[in-house]
Image (spheres, rainbow, N blue to C red):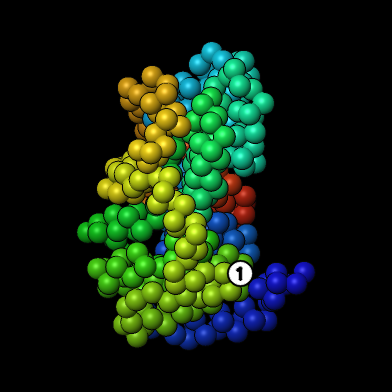
Amino acid sequence: MRHVDEYRDARAIEVVRARVEARLSRNRTLMEVCGGQTHSILKFGLDQLFPERLQLVHGPGCPVCVTPLEEIDRALAIAETEGTIFCSFGDMLRVPGSTHDLLIAKARGADVRIVYSPVDAVAIAREEPDREVVFFAVGFETTAPANAMAIRTAAREGLDNFSMLVAHVLVPPALEALLGDDDCRIEGLLAPGHVCVVTGMHDYHSVARRHSIPIVVTGFEPLDLMLGIDRCVEMIESGEVGVVNAYERAARADGNPAARELLADVFSVCDRKWRGIGEIPASGYEIAPAFRRFDARTRFAVSCIEAQEPAECMAGLVLQGRLKPTECPQFGRRCTPQNPMGATMVSSEGACAAYFQYGRPADVGASA
Ligand code: SF4
């Protein structure tokens, strides 16, 4: 397939692999930020191509995984409010809340609908003027422009029965939080190429400077990842600090200016709690004052929610790259994709799900 096969060419991958191995002077640790990158690395076995002295640790770049328990509980409370139609992407339906998930709420009679775009939720609001229609907006900067457009459309059409529960998170502040930790051992980052397609790379330059590390904007196909790893290792070995774009076919330094303008109009930056990590300043979007009437948080009186994470789940450490999923005692035993204990086992981008799906059988429950 054109534009895919060339990025999965085994010979090209081997050439880059050999180059990376030759560059390594000692043990090095890189983090790939995005869960989509984690899945590609495991799916194509890239982690098994390198010698042990190159460690790839997995970052917090799975929006479903980092949506805090309180938000899931809030979504459940709204979905179970009489007369509400609650719309969400399918991957949020099985994320466990404190007591149950959206799929169970649906089975119990709540009108929970899977949609493929926020525009679908706007269309439902148009068709059902007598019911409240809520869209659960979860994601990084990549999905935020479509959600902002949905709010603008609802405003333009005067759809007063449409609102959005916004749980958007932003990548650069999370990287600041991870790299600022005294125990951090990450020497280089593979930044998420699709996020930079929207936002550009400006914020990543300040992260790289502040923490004196290389950041390589990287894509998702095997060769993309190998080239990102190669450039990152080269920069680490030579002591080079800064941001390099290894995803030039899609990402530009200034991102997508029209999308950035849309985001700045509809959303404001706010502090946000990340599941398993905690509160990170200026790491999320909320609906800007001019559009606040579309905010499900204020439309539904369910704000006083406190939730406790299950003690056995170690997803917080997994999301910070401090623990491999197979090192969790529950992995593959009590916790599987069919019976997930944490969001990192539910999400299609979660690291635990990736290890389960692509891991060798010997990995399952190996550390227990
Ligand atoms: S394997 Fe399951 S219990 Fe362990 S960290 Fe992952 S999601 Fe949590």
The number of discs equals 1
Furthest-top residue in view? 82
| Residue 124 position by quadrant | top right
Tell me what residue is drawn at x 62 percent, y 59 percent: 43
Which corner quadrant holds the N terminus? bottom right
**On screen, 274 above or below 142?**
above
Tell me what residue is drawn at x 38 percent, y 19 percent: 301
Three-letter amino acid code at the position of disc 1: Pro
Q: Is residue 284 left or right of residue 180?
A: right
Tell me what residue is drawn at x 61 percent, y 34 percent: 121
Q: Is residue 112 visible?
A: yes
Q: Is residue 192 visible?
A: no
Q: Is residue 96 left or right of residue 209?
A: right
Q: Residues within 10 Å of mark 1 (few under 14, many from 20)?
A: many
Front residue (pair 186, 196): 196
- Residue 323 is situated, as x and y percent measured from the top left of the image, at 40, 52
- Residue 110 is situated, as x and y percent measured from the top left of the image, at 59, 18
Furthest-left residue in view? 182
Front residue (pair 80, 190): 80
| Residue 208 position by quadrant | bottom left
Furthest-right residue in view? 1
Q: Secondary structure at mark 1?
A: helix
- Residue 60 is situated, as x and y percent measured from the top left of the image, at 42, 52
Q: Which residue is mark 1?
A: 222
Tell me what residue is drawn at x 60 percent, y 28 percent: 125
**On screen, 304 above or below 348?**
above
Front residue (pair 148, 304): 148
Front residue (pair 50, 240): 240
- Residue 226 is situated, as x and y percent measured from the top left of the image, at 55, 74
Is ligand 1 within 8 Å of the beta carbon of the residue shown at mark 1? no
